[in-house]
């Protein structure tokens, strides 16, 4: 059983499709019941849990009203949001949304699933970004959220190693996703998806981390465009 956020788009969608194609069970965490119905129609066989990642403080309540899996082999945090702008221009609301979706929600979901993750000796995968390793102009809020996500993963790995929970952070370079298209719109640049990493290539790398034998753990994996 795999639990995936961001399963409806980009890297998360590619990963979910690969998991379903090989017969694995997947639960997608979605923002509301309407999105759950839509995703179930798009990806036959998928299960859903409703929880709004923009409101991490309500996730515990939302999940308490639903049936949770008794076993989780992997928890993949692939959802994310970005809003570019200078420190002088970004509003508190923009900061709050990016921190909530990119950092607080992964932390809270991991906390809520941790008892099952320990029993299952699961793998937790955080889809980070090159922005989680460096911060460029106009990227302050997004990079701050992704730097925080790296810290979360590093701490979790150290804390849960003795419990058999393996933690991987993946740092993709620019990937041809709807988020990347939005970034180009914000940058005022033409979008040429063929110049960037195919999301399926990142998904295959995540599968490698998930499927690795238990005697090994991929801790950090950077992926860069090959053309």
Image (tube, rainbow, N blue to C red):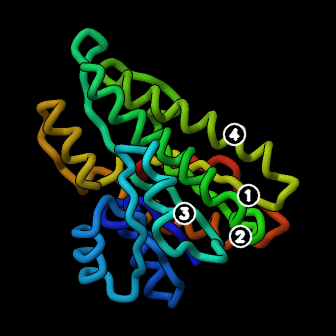
Q: Quadrant of the N terminus?
A: bottom right
Residue 78 rendering spot, x and y as whole percentages: 44, 55
| Residue annotated with mark 4 | 154
* Upstream in sequence: badge 3 or badge 4: 4
Q: Is residue 216 visible?
A: yes
Q: Is residue 62 above or below residue 190?
A: below
At numbered mark 2, what does the secondary structure look like: helix, strand or loop? loop
At numbered mark 1, what does the secondary structure look like: helix, strand or loop? strand
| Residue annotated with mark 1 | 166
* Upstream in sequence: badge 2 or badge 3: 3
Q: Which mark is residue 205?
A: 3
* Upstream in sequence: badge 3 or badge 1: 1
At numbered mark 3, what does the secondary structure look like: helix, strand or loop? helix
Task: Report if the CB atoms under discs 2 and 3 are less than 8 Å apart.
Answer: no
Task: Report if the CB atoms under discs 1 and 2 are less than 8 Å apart.
Answer: yes
Task: Report if the CB atoms under discs 3 and 1 are less than 8 Å apart.
Answer: no
C-alpha distance separating marks 1 and 2: 10 Å
Picture residue at 50% right of the left edge, 88% below the top: 22
C-alpha distance separating marks 1 and 4: 11 Å
| Residue annotated with mark 2 | 212
Residue 27 rendering spot, x and y as whole percentages: 47, 74
Q: Which residue is more in the foreground, 194 or 186?
A: 186
């Amino acid at each position: 059983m795999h639990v995936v956020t961001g399963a409806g788009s980009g890297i998360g969608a590619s990963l979910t499709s690969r998991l379903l194609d090989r017969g694995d069970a997947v639960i997608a965490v979605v923002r509301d019941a309407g999105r759950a119905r839509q995703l179930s129609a798009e990806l036959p066989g998928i299960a859903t849990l409703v929880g709004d990642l923009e409101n991490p403080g309500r996730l515990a309540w939302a999940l308490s009203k639903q049936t949770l899996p008794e076993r989780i082999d992997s928890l993949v945090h692939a959802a994310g949001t970005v809003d570019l702008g200078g420190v002088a221009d970004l509003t508190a609301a923009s900061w709050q949304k990016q921190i909530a979706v990119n950092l607080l929600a992964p932390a809270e979901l991991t906390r809520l699933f941790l008892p099952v993750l320990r029993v299952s000796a699961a793998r937790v995968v955080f889809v980070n970004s090159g922005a989680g390793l460096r911060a460029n102009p106009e990227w302050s809020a997004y990079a701050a959220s992704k730097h925080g996500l790296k810290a979360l993963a590093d701490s979790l790995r150290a804390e849960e190693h003795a419990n058999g929970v393996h933690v991987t952070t993946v740092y993709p370079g620019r990937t041809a996703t709807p988020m990347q298209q939005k970034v180009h719109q914000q940058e005022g640049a033409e979008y040429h998806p063929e110049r960037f990493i195919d999301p399926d290539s990142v998904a295959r790398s995540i599968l490698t981390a998930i499927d690795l034998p238990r005697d090994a753990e991929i801790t950090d994996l950077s992926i860069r465009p090959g053309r």
